[in-house]
Image (tube, rainbow, N blue to C red):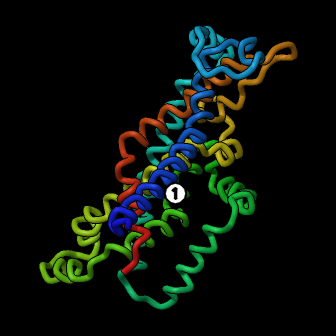
């Protein structure tokens, strides 16, 4: 007769094996496209046209020289994208957390309709509002200006929605009351008590905001017209071949350069993602 404990352990290990196997398959599926992108960045156009390859080649510097010959300063685009993404991330995180804190802590008339309106904004696709947004920026004289890409981060509906879900799971009203008793101002309570506690959620929101801003091609393509103000994704988009030849190796290298900051940013702050999302998904 089998020991029930051993039977349970065997069943648990069996289930765990298939869970890990499934996760490994998902990991491989996710990594292969990125690996092929990096490999193709080192291959010449004839090699790429021959088919897939999983090992790097020796044409990396050749592809880089082709990129330079196109007359595009990719490092300028790199700097432009970095400035826009960092500024957008800071504004998104701070004002989203501040707005979500106000919604979660205070009771005011119209609170529920206001939050429902934010949820509706999250569901609306960007394409529905881009024409009106462009005319609005044009009236303000902010077209071909980084402000048109950075300032809207102050009113990020998706950021407020995420921050609200996170704060609902970790706000401790007794700490807020204790801060008031000690004479702290309401904004002081937010800065000195709530933000340090909500750091995992803030970092998680910051990662998502940075990646979204870095990859933001649609808005930038419509609002920015000066070549020296192009972001890196915009510059890579302009890498077209002439009538006779398209340099796929150079295009792949340009695409590879665009993912470097995302990988670095994620590597530095990835440990906050799991804790931030896990806490934000648990309600009392």
Q: Residue furthest bottom?
A: 109
| Relative to 225, residue 189 above or below | below
Residue linked to disc 1: 153
Q: Residue furthest left?
A: 182
Q: Relative to 131, is 72 on the left or the right?
A: left
Nearest to the observer: residue 57 or residue 121:
57
| Relative to 18, residue 178 above or below | below
Numbered marks: total: 1
| Quadrant holding the C terminus | bottom left
Q: Which residue is found at the position 73% from the left and 61% from the top?
A: 132
Nearest to the observer: residue 55 or residue 275:
55
* Any part of residue 124 in sight: yes
| Relative to 230, residue 107 above or below | below
Q: Which residue is found at the position 62% from the left and 70% from the top?
A: 121
Q: Which residue is found at the position 25% from the left and 62% from the top?
A: 196
Q: Which residue is found at the position 39% from the left and 64% from the top?
A: 7
Residue 172 image position (x, y, % from top left): 26, 78
Q: Quadrant of residue 230?
A: top right
Q: Quadrant of residue 178?
A: bottom left
């Amino acid at each position: 007769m089998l020991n029930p404990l051993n039977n349970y352990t065997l069943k648990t290990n069996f289930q765990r094996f298939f869970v890990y196997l499934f996760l490994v398959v998902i990991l491989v599926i996710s990594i292969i496209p990125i690996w092929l992108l990096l490999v193709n960045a080192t291959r010449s156009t004839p090699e790429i046209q021959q088919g897939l390859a999983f090992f790097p080649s020796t044409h990396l510097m050749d592809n880089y020289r082709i990129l330079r010959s196109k007359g595009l300063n990719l490092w300028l685009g790199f700097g432009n994208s970095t400035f826009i993404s960092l500024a957008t991330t800071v504004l998104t995180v701070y004002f989203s957390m501040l707005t979500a804190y106000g919604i979660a802590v205070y009771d005011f008339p119209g609170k529920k309709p206001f939050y429902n309106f934010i949820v509706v904004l999250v569901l609306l696709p960007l394409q529905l509002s881009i024409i009106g947004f462009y005319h609005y920026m044009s009236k303000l004289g902010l077209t071909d200006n980084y402000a048109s890409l950075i300032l809207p981060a102050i009113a990020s509906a998706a950021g407020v929605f995420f921050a609200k879900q996170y704060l609902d799971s970790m706000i401790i009203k007794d700490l807020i009351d204790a801060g008031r008793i000690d004479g702290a101002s309401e904004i002081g309570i937010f800065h000195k008590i709530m933000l340090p506690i909500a750091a995992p959620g803030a970092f998680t929101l910051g990662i998502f905001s940075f990646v979204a801003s870095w990859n933001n091609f649609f808005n930038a393509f419509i609002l920015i017209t000066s070549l020296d103000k192009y972001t890196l994704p915009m510059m890579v988009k302009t890498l077209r071949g002439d009538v006779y030849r398209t340099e796929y190796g150079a295009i792949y290298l340009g695409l590879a350069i665009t993912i470097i900051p995302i990988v670095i940013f994620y590597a530095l702050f990835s440990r906050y993602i799991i804790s931030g999302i896990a806490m934000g998904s648990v309600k009392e």
